[in-house]
Amino acid sequence: MNLKRLASARPSSIGIGAVVLLVGAIGFLPLFDGPGYESALAAGLVVPSAAAITTALSASEARPAPFDAFASGLARGAMFVGAAWLVTIVHGLRAGFCDPLSGSVLFALGPGVGALLAGAWGAAAGEIAGRVKRRRLCAVLLALAAPLVSVGVSLVRFYTSPMVFAYDPFVGYFSGSLYDTVIDASGLYAYRAGSAATLLAGAVLASHLTRTEEGKLARRSKSQPGAIVLGVFAATASLGMTLFGHRLGHWHTPTSIAETLGGRVESERCDVVYPRGMPREDALRFARDCSAHVVAQEAWLETKGPAKITAYLFADPTQKGALMGAADTYIAKPWRNEVYVQQNGYPHPVLGHEIAHVMAGSFGRGPFRIAGSLGGLLPNPGLIEGIAVATSPHEGALSAREWAKAMKDLGKLPKLSRLFALGFLGENSSVAYTASGAFVGFVKERYGAAAVRAWYGGGSLPEITGASWDELERSFHEDLDRVVLPEAAAAQARARFERPGIFGRRCPHVVDACRKRAEEQKARGDDEGVIEALREVLALDPGESGARVSIARALVRLGKPDAGKAELQVIADEARFPRHVRDRALEELGDLALAEGDHERAMVQYREVMSRTVEEDPLRTLDVKLEATQNPRGKDAIVALLVGTTGRGPDKIRAAEELGAWAASATDDGLPDYLLARSYVGSGDFAEAARRLDRALGRRLGIGRVAAEAERLRLVTACALDDRPTAERMTLAYVARKDVPRARREAAASLYARCTGALAPAVPEATKAGGALP
């Protein structure tokens, strides 16, 4: 075949021009500037259609022999995708490559094979179109039919099942979630084996057809039995891989997912599908909390939700990613009254957020029952996520309103016009979710739940409230100005909100994949592998300065403490690094000083970090480390649990032994029993955790934050064990602690209300804003 003549043919010239123009323009968008997941996805939407159309037009006019038409379609598809790949290479040279080899492999398996299939389909479409009067129109429509039907099948699967990912014969692989930055497209290898079988079957069929003098297709008089057998085998393999794709992970249905998970329980308002390996009592506990969330949110939204919500509870992110996609992102589908989460302890930290999406669907718009324009077809992500954040606040030291105040003080608070539009997706997710939740909460408090429901259901907020967007924004900012924050909040807000969104990051997929590999290597004890992976991170994005701290700590574990400490000291001292990264290095230096017995230095470094920390969990951990500098009896246990020795990280087994001995010998100290109880809570042994917490609370707990947390954990265990009297007692004690941030006490009161069905107790104001102690 003469490729030069093929490229110069008018349809091909126009097609290549369109591919180069479109892929070239898309390449100027963030994340699309080089071979990789996004550029492969974009090319998969453009290149196969262009190859199919041009092949169909050419074949319908020239009416070549069937095999020649088939081969011409393959050649044209290869030529088009090659041109698109070269354009991405040019963009990579312009902007810098991330991982050109892996990106090119993904490009070949995605739009590369897709363009070959499209070329083959274009030959068939051209054959059909050549027989009708309006040949060119028919050729174009038939050529587009297969890619469009294929996308339609994926959309139907998305709408009718839990699936959010898609394998498409023309496009390739779509992961389904914007926030899952580590893309696992390994399933494409098996999927493309089916594509190869399809092409082989098509080649055998085309080789056994000929064109008569009248222009009609006919079977060749001389057939090749071996080729026919091969073609039948290939066709059978292609059909089998399509029909049994759920066994290969290419698609799933609610039935196949439920069968794979294997367990099912129900409560008054929730059906829970869960993995067989999970204890049934844990699933029942989850189901009860699910129902309680529904009831609580009905009260907040002042509306009635679905009679039943189905919650798919997966064992871990890997299982979730394999069965429905979105491995590391929690998902809800309001139109199906379903939520999809993985196990994450009790109470589940994100279950309420996902249920809120389903609850909002009761007054949402369109087929997806969401907030948005064009009848709900164009989503308003700020309002969709904002109502979930406001309805089910995240448990932490500061509320969404307080964090929004910190954003405003830093100049990071987005304009409402950007927040409640597609500009939401361009923001750092922490900024976007928190700010939108704070504003929805403001609307609810100022104008009532009916206003929130009407806005979500498609109403104009200015018409609903009688205030323009400018007036609403001004009132919102005035409300935030009344919030008084602790000084430490500014440093924490910078760490939380200054990281760019996914579209502003350099090579996020490769960087996060390297980080994940570093975590896996650390778990295996391969610190050289940790350093290697993190140096790749820094080579791609020198701004990822947190990787430097992890490298320094790995050097210490490798038996190079002097090199590790020197690097940590450089990071802690130099102002060019972000303050939160410098504080992390400072805490690591404190850990090393504690392990080496330099208690004075450790105390100074821990206290400096605490002065810029607002969240209770890290503050409490630092409190316990400070205790180790002053408590010789407990030091070894605390170091084993939280720090580790110079050459090793934390050792849970040794820590358990040391904590047990400490608890037995220091009968007046409740700290060792508290620390053991935390481990039991983490493992789901709530009965033993409750026993240990009772013992700790009956002894001396000299650290204020530890005493408060012991009460909160005892509330959690009481709820888990359906011990209502203890739950009430612990709740009243905890919410009365004015030194605990109000947001945390409100979360505890909410848990008490959910697990007992009683009214949540009133939560008094904190002793000072945010409640964070120095």
Image (tube, rainbow, N blue to C red):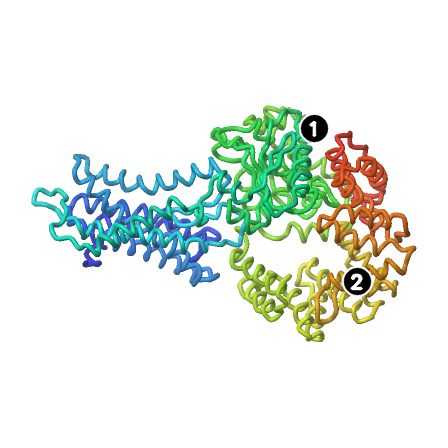
Q: CA distance from mark 1 to mark 2?
A: 55 Å
Indicate the amino acid at tag 2.
Answer: Glu
Task: Please identify the quarter of the rendering in which residue 218 is found.
Answer: top left
Left-right relation of 521 to 773 = left
The quadrant in which residue 147 appears is top left
Quarter of the image that includes the N terminus: bottom left
Looking at the image, can residue 13 be seen? Answer: no
Left or right, residue 750 beside residue 466:
right
Query: On residue 446, which mark appears?
Result: 1
Q: Which mark is residue 286?
A: none
Above or below — where is 354 with respect to 537?
A: above
Residue 472: x, y in percent?
A: 64, 31
Can you give x and y, in whole percent of width and height, for residue 448 in the image? 68, 26
Query: How many residues crowd mark 1 within 10 Å: few (<14), some (14–19), many (20+)?
Result: few
Counting the numbered discs, the total is 2
Residue topped by disc 2: 657
Residue at figure coordinates x 42%, y 58% from the top left: 35
Please give the name of the residue rendered at 31% of the width and 41% of the height, measured from the top-left corner: 146
Q: Position of residue 531 (x, y in %)?
A: 60, 69
**Residue drawn 66% across and 39% down?**
286
Q: Is residue 381 left or right of residue 70?
A: right
Quick check: can you spot residue 246?
yes
Q: Residue at x 21, y 56 (%)?
A: 226
Name the element at disc 2.
Answer: helix
Q: Nearer the viewer, mark 1 or mark 2?
A: 2
Amino acid at pointer 1: Arg
Q: Is residue 355 left or right of residue 44?
A: right
